[in-house]
């Protein structure tokens, strides 16, 4: 089984929840020989054992349910404060289903109508629904003005799905939609010219350059960090040294760095740099880069590319740098200390390290069409991907808390 999550944002671009997308090992890019019911059962069992908070944290989890599974009592395994029940668009609406949905709603579950194409004024589940989802590839935004207005008047939360560009996001928001789903947040909007970087980016680059020398020096690193008050404070704070006597700032910073170690310092500095570069971009973008970084490293460790784990980790970390800077990836990587092989993947989508990047993208989209072929190429056991993905999510959450 593999479960990926797709963020759902509110109007302020804060994460409201995640839709959990899943496939079992026997499935390709669709349910295949498995039914939606058996797949959902697999996911709910796994989520119950794992603990849903490991995947969605304190956000809501949107999960699809078909007719048969809506009638089962397995749904109650999941806390109603976390789960949003998505009623699939092909569910037959009859008396048992209407009774069951009312029962679930009375127990505190939120009800969402997935890929809604029916009449919002007459569809019998609408009065009990909390959220109405429109797939804008199926029902374009231009056709939804009246429905959105009616839904808002009825107190419904309107969700636009398959939002792929910033322009679509802005248009849907102006129409009155409350929630937005899609990968629009991870695509650059290139407007010409280069974005001006803040002065402190030079500090980050100096640190990374020193870390990539044959024999990096804690003494030199402490000297570089001492030149930036904000950076010095954060280095000491993350390790609990902010209350130390700061008469010898360089010595205090060096002590903090020794505790952290070169590898952890590199990860931490990269995260701080991403925050600096991302400006007003959503925090979910930084979180995505962190998850990719750890996930890529775990894939590499367990593949025939194990010796290149750190290089692959950095490649994945910088995989959304173009979006953060609103530049082409080629421009975004200018002055960044990465290898030519990393640039080959991120700029030209080719090269020896590309299989790891492809596996991550397949998992994010839950598209297994090429997944098993790619994992075989670098000798990865695809049955372990889910465990590594969960580890990467947990790691990213810890990192975000520390910075």
Image (cartoon, helix red, strand yellow):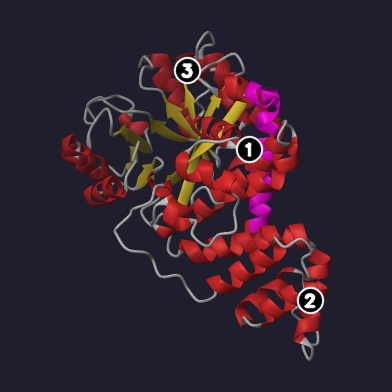
- What label does residue 261 carry, if any? none
Magenta part, dominant SS: helix
Does residue 222 show up magenta in the picture?
no
> In the picture provided, is 392 more to the left or to the right than 89?
right
Compared with 224, 86 (above or below) is above
Nearer to us of marks 3 and 2 is 2
- The answer to which quarter of the image holds residue 257 is bottom right
Q: Residues within 10 Å of mark 3 (few under 14, many from 20)?
A: some
Q: Is residue 184 visible?
A: yes
> In the picture provided, is 300 more to the left or to the right than 315?
right
Report x, y in % for residue 326.
38, 57
Which residue position holds label 3?
30
Q: Considering the numbered disc 2 on the image, is that residue within a helix, a strand or a loop?
A: helix
Q: Residue at x 44, y 52 (%)?
A: 330
Report x, y in % for residue 74.
60, 22
Count all numbered tags in the image, as a single digit: 3
Nearer to us of marks 3 and 1 is 3
Front in this rendered view, residue 103 or 145: 145
Does residue 396 show up magenta in the picture?
yes
Q: Considering the numbered disc 1 on the image, is that residue within a helix, a strand or a loop?
A: loop
Compared with 389, 266 (above or below) is below
Cα distance, mark 3 to mark 1?
23 Å
* Mark 3 vs 2, N-terminal side: 3
Q: Residues within 10 Å of mark 1 (few under 14, many from 20)?
A: many
Q: What's the magenta region?
A: 376-399
Q: Residues within 10 Å of mark 2 (few under 14, many from 20)?
A: some
* Mark 1 vs 2, N-terminal side: 1
Q: Residue at x 80, y 80 (%)?
A: 252
Front in this rendered view, residue 35 or 326: 326
Q: Considering the numbered disc 3 on the image, is that residue within a helix, a strand or a loop?
A: loop
């Amino acid at each position: 089984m593999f479960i990926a999550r797709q963020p759902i944002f509110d109007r302020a671009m804060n994460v409201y929840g995640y839709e959990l997308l899943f496939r079992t090992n026997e499935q390709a890019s669709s349910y295949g020989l498995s039914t939606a019911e058996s797949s959902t059962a697999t996911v709910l069992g796994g989520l119950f054992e794992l603990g849903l908070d490991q995947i969605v944290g304190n956000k809501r989890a949107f999960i699809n349910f078909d007719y048969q599974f809506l009638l089962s009592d397995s749904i109650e395994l999941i806390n109603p404060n976390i789960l949003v029940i998505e009623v699939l668009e092909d569910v037959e609406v009859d008396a048992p289903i209407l009774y069951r949905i009312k029962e679930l709603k009375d127990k505190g579950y939120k009800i969402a109508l997935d890929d809604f194409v029916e009449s919002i004024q007459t569809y019998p589940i609408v009065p009990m629904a909390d959220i109405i989802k429109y797939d804008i590839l199926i029902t374009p935004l231009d056709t939804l003005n009246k429905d959105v207005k009616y839904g808002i008047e009825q107190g419904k939360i309107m969700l636009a799905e398959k939002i792929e560009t910033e322009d679509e996001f802005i248009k849907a928001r102006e129409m009155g939609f409350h929630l937005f789903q899609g990968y629009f947040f991870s695509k650059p909007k290139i407007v010409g010219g280069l974005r001006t970087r803040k002065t402190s980016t030079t500090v980050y680059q100096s640190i990374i350059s020193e870390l990539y020398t044959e024999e990096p020096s804690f003494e030199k690193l402490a000297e570089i960090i001492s030149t930036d008050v904000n950076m010095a404070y954060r280095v000491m704070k993350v390790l609990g040294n902010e209350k130390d006597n700061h008469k010898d700032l360089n010595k205090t910073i060096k002590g903090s760095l020794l505790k952290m170690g070169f590898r952890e310092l590199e990860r931490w500095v990269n995260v701080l740099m991403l925050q600096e570069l991302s400006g007003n971009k959503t925090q979910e973008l930084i979180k995505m880069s962190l998850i990719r970084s750890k996930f890529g490293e775990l894939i590499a460790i367990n593949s025939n590319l194990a010796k290149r784990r750190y290089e692959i980790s950095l490649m994945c970390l910088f995989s959304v740098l173009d979006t953060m800077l609103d530049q082409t990836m080629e421009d975004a990587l200018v002055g960044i200390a990465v290898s030519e092989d990393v640039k080959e993947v991120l700029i030209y989508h080719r090269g020896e390290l590309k299989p790891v990047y492809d596996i991550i993208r397949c998992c994010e989209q839950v598209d297994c069409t090429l997944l098993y072929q790619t994992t075989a190429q670098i000798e990865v056991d695809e049955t372990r991907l889910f465990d590594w993905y969960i580890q990467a999510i947990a790691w990213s959450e810890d990192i975000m808390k520390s910075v």
